[in-house]
Image: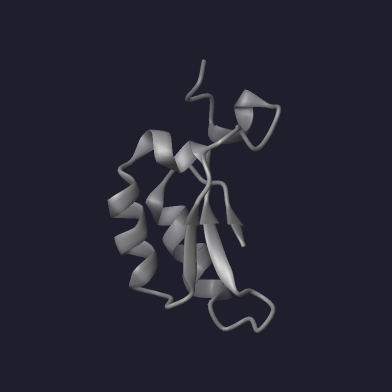
Amino acid sequence: MKCSFSSTKKLESTVEATNDFDFIVGDRISTGLGLTSKISDAVKSMLRFTNLSIICAHQKFSFNSPDFYGGIFL
C-alpha cells in the first residue's frame, strides 16, 4: 500500500488499520514522509503494527499537487 503521508501518526494509524487485509502485501513510504521525518523512525513506527515488506520509494514526487503534503514544499 502506498503511504503518502507527511506525519508518522497518520502512517501508523493507516498501517495498523490495514494490516489484516489479505490483498496488501507490503507498504511503501513515499517522498513526503521521507522529507519530514527520518526514514528509520518511520520504519520503526511501521514495524510496531506490521511484519509486511516496507519499501522506500523516493525517485519522484508521487502527486502533481504540492498541497497534497500540506504545503511543505512551498
From the viewer's perspective, is residue 72 above or below residue 63? above
Which quadrant of the structure image shows residue 22? bottom right
Which residue, as the protein is rendered here, is positioned at the far front? 59
* Residue 55 position in % (x across, y down): 49, 57
Task: Look at the image and tell me in which quarter the N terminus lies.
Answer: bottom right
Which quadrant of the structure image shows residue 48? bottom left
* Residue 2 position in % (x across, y down): 61, 55
Could you tell me how many numbered marks the image carries?
A: 0
Q: At 54% from the left edge and 56% from the top edge, which residue is drawn?
A: 28
**Nearest the eye: 23 or 58:** 58
Tell me, what colour scheme is on the image? one colour
**Nearest the eye: 57 or 34:** 57
* Residue 44 position in % (x across, y down): 30, 62
Q: At 53% from the left edge and 24% from the top edge, which residue is drawn?
A: 71
Q: At 55% from the left edge and 34% from the top edge, which residue is drawn?
A: 69
**Nearest the eye: 20 or 26:** 26
Q: At 35% from the left edge and 59% from the top edge, which residue is drawn?
A: 43
From the viewer's perspective, is residue 14 above or below residue 4? below
Left or right of residue 74: residue 34? left
* Residue 15 position in % (x across, y down): 50, 67
